Image (spheres, rainbow, N blue to C red):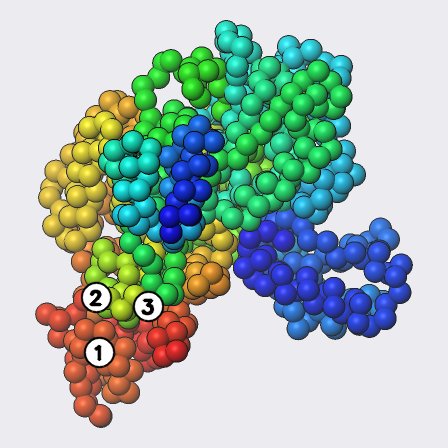
Amino acid sequence: MNDTLDKIVADYRDNGGNVISLLQETQEAFGYIPREAVDYFSAQLGIAPSRFYGVATFYSQFRLNPTGKNKIIACCGTACHVRGAERILSGIKRELSLAEEEETTQDKEFTVEKVACLGFCSFAPVVLINGEVHGKTNADPILKEIRKLKNK
Amino acid sequence: MGPAGIAAGGKHVLESFKEALSGTGITASLKENCSSHQVGCLGLCARDVLVEIHQGGTKTVYQYVKADMVRRIVDEHLVGGTPVKEWLVDGAYDAFYKKQVKVVLSDVGRIDPEEISAYEAVGGYEAAKEVLHSWYPEEVIEEIKMSGIRGRGGAGFPTGLKWELGRKAPGETKYIVCNADEGDPGAFMDRAVIEGNAHAVIEGMIIGAYALCAHHGYVYIRAEYPLAVERLKRAISQATAKGYLGKKIFGCDFDLEIKIKLGAGAFVCGEETALIASIEGQRGQPRAKPPFPVNKGLWQKPTVINNVETLANIPYIIRRGCAWYASYGTEKSRGTKVFALTGKIKNPGLIEVPMGITLREIIEDIGGGIENGKQLKAVQTGGPSGGCIPANKLDLNVDYESLAKAGSIVGSGGMIVLDEDDCMVNVAKYFVQFTQSESCGKCVPCRVGTKRLLETLERICKGHGRSNDIERLEKLSAGIKATSLCGLGQTAPNPILSTIRYFRDEFEAHIRDKKCPAKVCKGLLTYSISEKKCKACGACLRACPSGAITGEKKTPHKIDQAKCIKCGSCFEVCKFGSVERN
Ligand SMILES: Cc1cc2nc3c(=O)[nH]c(=O)nc-3n(C[C@H](O)[C@H](O)[C@H](O)COP(=O)(O)O)c2cc1C
Ligand code: FES
């Protein structure tokens, strides 16, 4: 881990100290922003951890916890909203026994994320399951797909 | 092939074409004639994958193409010479294009977006070359001013004027920034332009940079658009290799370097001062203006920020002249505008129309009307900063002034069509939910005000509306508009105000009668099973996630209202229409 972090610190110094780029690189490497990474940056660069967390929590892209094995992204943009995105999302959350604000299941099998528009609006409503686009869909086929993944 | 094309399996189709063409021993010359290149978005996304076949001077278009259809198209059409009739596009396809005027999209969907030579073959980079070799910067600014183009990012500020201010701003170091944050949820114009013709954006930036005398450019693009980022990167490296970017570009004494900055998912970063903070690596919070970015922008240096579509228009304006561009549109809104037409429309997709076209022409002629024979209720434009235009105002001209007068805005180009099944209170709530969660929290009116707006709307949708709620919403909205720090807060109440203005009766039905006329708001609905119609098939019982339905074989089922979570699952699965929603 330290080699990766050192490289990120070096890049940070090279590109004139951009916290967002540093966090993006970190998330690219680990899938989330680990606490140890922030502590390490803080020690190496002499910047308070709160600076990093301040930026990380401002932008929705950054996550402070690892994601589940399967990643489901439900679009809740306007075009999807008027075509029943909410019903699909609540169906998915129910299927996975996730509370309203929860994203990742206890067994770390699934992470469900809500985004505002993926740019596939003509295919609304849209759900991405592990990167694959499911457009013009409804709860049924999505839940079937999820059950398939569950049984794997 | 844009994002939708890829989503619809465009990659597979492309592969299949390659395979089929090489597999059947088709001669090399034929291969060249129909070299299957991948293109950007063709516009009519819902019919993807669209495949165009150009043979000599004729063009044939197939719709909904799947990989397993390719072999037959190749065999019968390319080898045999007779198109596969039943897969060709129908009349709606022509209607979709007839009233459109393509300027910024003229090459999108026509050329291979991954090859600089394809763009050059249609005249690409000639404008930049000419401008750098033989125009004064002031002439460029004058030309853009005369074209009348106004910023396409939302505010509609005249681009020529912005450049002039940037040129006159004192300072050695200046920046030009392309705003590709496209935050409006439900819009994808900028994405389509970059994916379909990133080189036009770069050429526009080169011309702008020259006019301002800026040697550094940034493109701030949202990370949710991986394909656009990839194509942009590729375009920049191709342009650099050609000597169109870098030192002494086009052999002139002018340097320009363009860097890409990835956004990290914050709507407010589309706002200029927040965008600047974000490029600098900080939390994307706006600051008070003035000083404006043209004087104090990135790292306190003069900075001009333009939207993707604005910049991509520039090469076409220079190449064909300001008079040509200004011949489209209205007196005060010149040229064309790209819209992402979505929602309950028959032919959703990306369209480019002359300013001043009526909404009716867009909805009925281009979009083919409302799907499933439903009634149009309203058209939402301008996203979270805009408003809803009701069906009886369909003859409104789409330009900056007319839309503003009607309580909405042109905005960045999202156009969402709503039908009788959409609840306007819910739509207003949706947008406030969005702005409330995207408010950066720096100023109180926006942070607290949007929260109070949302709470009130949520209460109304749950059936706890109070008689003075409409007045409260209006009063609070006025305060937020007047006192918020940036455009986000200043426009956040617009969706509420415009829906109250045109759909007051729907608000009143929610508040006074505790009814949602469109049957959307969960809190105001009850589900019940008609004893007469129920066939006791058990479908609803199995579908109910909360165990609220009971019933035996051959006895009509019942819903326990205390347990019902109003998810609507039973209503959807019942084949006999025996679940009633009121
Ligand atoms: C909250 C907010 C979000 C915005 N989002 C965008 C955006 O996503 N893309 C964009 O080009 N402009 C956006 N704008 C407008 C920009 O601040 C700016 O006016 C525009 O990029 C200027 O370019 P133009 O003159 O070419 O339109 C936004 C403004 C506000 C207040
Ligand atoms: S609104 Fe869902 S993809 Fe655009």
Kind of residue sitting beneath label 3: Glu
User: Going 73% across and 65% down the picture, which residue do you hit?
Assistant: B17
Chain ID at mark 3: A
Instruction: Answer whether labels 1 and 2 touch (C-beta < 8 Å).
Output: no
Q: Position of residue B213 (x, y in %)?
A: 60, 15
**Mark 1 and mark 3 on one chain:** no
Question: Does dot 2 land on a helix, a strand or a loop?
Answer: loop
Residue B75 drawn at (x, y percent): 80, 72
- Quick one: A43 or B109, which is closer to the camera? A43
Residue mark closest to the camera, 1 vs 2: 2
Residue A109: which disc?
Answer: 3
- Residue farthest bottom in this picture: B554
Identify which residue is drawn at 12% across, 38% down: B468
Answer left or right for A18 relative to B226: left
Quarter-of-image position of residue B26: bottom right
Label 2: which residue?
B566
User: What residue is shown at x 65% (from left), y 12% (from top)?
Assistant: B137
Q: Earlier in the sequence, mark 1 or mark 2?
A: 1
Quadrant position of ligand 1? top left
The quadrant the C terminus of chain B occupies is bottom left
- Front: mark 3 or 2: 3
> Would you name the residue on which mark 1 appears?
B530
Q: Amino acid at mark 2?
A: Lys
> Which element carries disc 3, helix, strand or loop?
loop
The answer to whether A126 appears left or right of B161 in the picture is left
Q: Nearer the viewer, residue B147 or B214?
A: B214
Mark 1 secondary-structure assignment: loop
Looking at the image, is B240 positioned above or below residue A2?
A: above
Subunit under mark 2: B
